[in-house]
Amino acid sequence: MVLCSAGWLAATGPVLADEAKPEAKPLKLTTTADHTKFKELQKVFNSGPEVTKACLACHTEAAGQIHRTKHWKWEYLNPETKQTLGKKTVVNNFCISIASNYASCTSCHVGYGWKDANFDFKSEENVDCLACHDTSGNYKKPPGFAGNPVTKDTEFPPGSGKIIKGIDLSKIAQKVGKTSRDTCGACHFNGGGGDGVKHGDMDSSLAAPTKDIDVHMDAEGLDFTCGTCHKTSSHDVAGSRYTPTAKDDKGVQVRGKAGSGNPATCVACHDNAPHKKEARLNQHATKIACQTCHIPTYARGGIATKMTWDWSTAGKRDKDGKHIVLKDAKGRITYESRKGDFTLAENVKPEYAWFNGNVQYTLLSDKIEKSEQRTPINKMGGSPSDGKSMIWPMKVFRGAQPYDPVNKSLITPHTAGNDDTGFWKNLDWDKAIPVGMKDSGAPYSGKFDFIKTEMSWPITHMVAPKEKALGCAECHSKNGRLAGIQGIYIPVRDNNKLLDTAGWSIVFLTLLGVFGHGAMRIVSSRKHHS
């Protein structure tokens, strides 16, 4: 009886246990908090700061952390050059400067309300949490609103008949999460005023790239986000355009280890000797940046990048006095009255230069001379003999932009305002320049001309699969990619015909002597034995 009871329990016990087991609770595996359940977010938000106030109720330290970062300050003191840099200060040869153009440019600032030089950088509620943490894809900050989202349908510019649809901040706030390629890309893919315009190695093709476009970010492969390499600590993102790490000799870095350097370099994961099967290539890696071989071309995701921008041709009108827009066969804008002429390109071979990470900018306070030589907006430091330089791929962007021939300085014009002095509206430099220079706090003589400039951008994204890296002949040839690089001997490129002839002659004569001597020894030996 006991045995029968035991057998029955053994046979039916598990079944009863399964029947009694409650169903698994629906669970999100990508986050530890479901923000739709927070009462603080279940309300109507009429502005961005209202959302931030709700965020800070729980994330009490977040705003203070953001306040310490370059993403908030748009200002950076280079410890080596002592130059004060950052978007707030530097001049470039794309849209030139944010001075007097804040309301447009700050649509990419991680804050709300930066409309002029009096922005409150101490305000916690002005921190924009949604810019980096939106996962809905619906969060937008249109240019012209000083970094504020539009929550009600709004005609903009006023009187234009164009309506910007308002967005629901409550729905967006309830779907916050980790940063993504989309959130970073919303600004960084569109630097310079459009998709792929500025960097060349960053555009919207990286939102969901194939392996050929970027082996690390491949959406069906490794699927790296920007944050995988640009590891954040206390909201401060690793990596810098102003002090990039040109040569990393620290080897593989353990995340979280104090003083381990920049986690965003190739070496941080791949070590200083990354080629396990072709050890000879590791010798190349002592002088050549990984990007030089592994990014054969940039802008190869089907989106063209701007290569030149000539402001001197801006301001033309058609016969009816209206602005002109011209496009190429692919529908890409090549001329606008408000901006001038452009050239664009895809699958661009980089230019190459020795680079040690030191970047010296030409600032508004620096004196410049007009000549046949282009004025560098930034100078990339480096040489073959300083022990700190590697050969890097660069996008070199060339243009012509306004300058003051009397004060011999660059100019920061007022371009983006919807007012009578904004150049993009009235096409009048005489109105636009004084306003911009006054906002910059710089003197203006009242006269302007145009000066040719160039600006270099190290290429470091769009890493190709190893089978599509550069082959030997790309550099080891007379007119190869490194034809202009000085201070290093490159076989084939640097071969000397006379020296080669003399060398091979010596080798031939040496071999002739060896074989001749051997033959005479053999003949002599046979005579001796006979």
Image (spheres, rainbow, N blue to C red):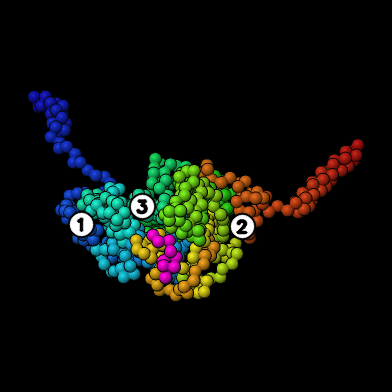
Q: Which quadrant would residue 86 be assigned to in this image?
A: bottom left
Identify the element where label 2 is drawn. Answer: loop
Q: Locate residue 364, reporting x and y percent.
A: 46, 70
Residue bearing mark 2: 485
- At label 3, which amino acid type do we have? Ala
Residue bearing mark 3: 186
Residue sitting nearer the eye, 201 or 78: 201
Q: Residue at x 60, y 47 (%)?
A: 474
Q: Earlier in the sequence, mark 1 or mark 2?
A: 1
Identify the element where label 3 is drawn. Answer: helix
For the residues labelled 1 and 2, the Cα–Cα distance comes to 57 Å
Residue sitting nearer the eye, 342 or 55: 342
Q: Which quadrant would residue 420 be assigned to in this image?
A: bottom left
Residue 385 counted in the magenta span: no
Q: Locate residue 63, reporting x and y percent.
A: 27, 63
- Magenta region: 425-434
Looking at the rendered structure, which numbered label has been put on residue 357?
A: none
Q: Earlier in the sequence, mark 2 or mark 3?
A: 3
